Amino acid sequence: MDPQDVSGGEEGRPVPVCGEWTQLSAFQYSAELVAGPGAELDPSEVTIQGCECQGPHCSPEKCACLPHGENYHHRRLRSSQKPILECNVLCHCGESCANRETQQGLQFQLQVCQVPGKGWGLFTQENIPSGRFVCEYAGEVLSPEEACQRVRAQDPEANNYIIAVREHLHSGHILETFIDPTHVGNIGRFLNHSCQPNLVMVPVRTHSMQPRLALFAAQDIQPGEELCYDYSGMAFNFTPSSGHTQGKEKDRSQCKKCLCGTASCSGYLPFDATLFEAPT
């Protein structure tokens, strides 16, 4: 059977599928975030004022989009520990500006394949250098109430695609983002968890304060490797700022076994107990 295209070429390169496409037909492919029930922000609305830089490139000394210095160096992420703001459609700089990396679509040939015991997985068919943007985790943006409602309504044996990202600000305030690619999403939904991941998830803002969840290579990745990230957000982060974080003491009866097979495997998939509680 010839590989089929899961993306229709909507975000750069098409992504072939090796397996039965009928099992994947229940979701609508979208390369971008979409506003779901209860979303406070429309992710498609341009709300961030662009920079006034003249010429094809921006410099940290002058660009309003680079308050923390350069985000990328030779297309590689400089740090996953600082806020990322990219130039947008309102910026005066050119489209070739290096501060538009995640807006370039897929740059590497990826493939969705079935993985024994884990369902589907996402694999690379070529080398991916450390620091390069790989893909986005796109889906419906939900309110906390809708996210909790969907999680509590799920079959315990069903896959949970909902991710809760918590950004800890210096002021002590926490920004929460809930993304669900179950019904509307992109190839990011096929990424499996690993306790020793080769990807790191970073919130990136372009034209809206609604962050896009961008995944970057945390190391050099070889052809044929499965692409994975840490659902808990603990890997490569000094604080538990993203993913399915513990929230409180885990109830192991609600956790699913982790099948990542790494030496540092915790034995269970990360579990966010707060998503099973009624929002206050």
Image (spheres, grey):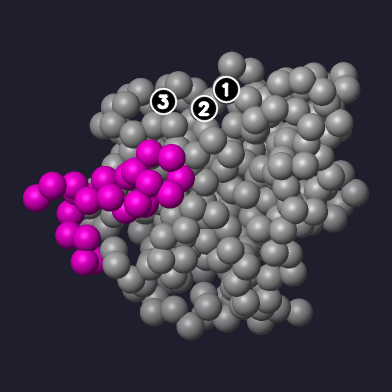
In percent of width and height, residue 256 lies at 39, 63
Q: Are circles 3 and 2 on residues that touch, CB within 8 Å?
A: yes
**Residue 77 lies in what quarter of the image?**
top right
Majority secondary structure in the magenta region: loop
Please tell me which residue is depicted at 77% across the width and 20% down the height of the picture. Answer: 55
Q: Position of residue 143 (x, y in %)?
A: 67, 72
For residue 49, above or below residue 99: below
Q: In the depicted view, which residue is nearer to us: 238 or 139?
A: 139
On the picture, is 210 further left or further right than 64? Answer: left
Name, please, the residue furthest toward the top: 74
Label 1 environment density (alpha carbons within 10 Å; few <14, some 14–19, many ≥20): some
Residue 3 within the segment the image draws in magenta? yes
Q: Position of residue 227 (x, y in %)?
A: 38, 39
Image: magenta residue range: 1-23
Location of mark 1 (residue): 75
Residue type at the position of mark 1: Arg
Comes first in the chain, label 1 or label 2: 1
According to the picture, the residue beneath numbered tag 2 turns out to be 132
- Does the magenta run of residues contain 49? no
**Mark 1 near mark 2, Cβ–Cβ under 8 Å?**
yes
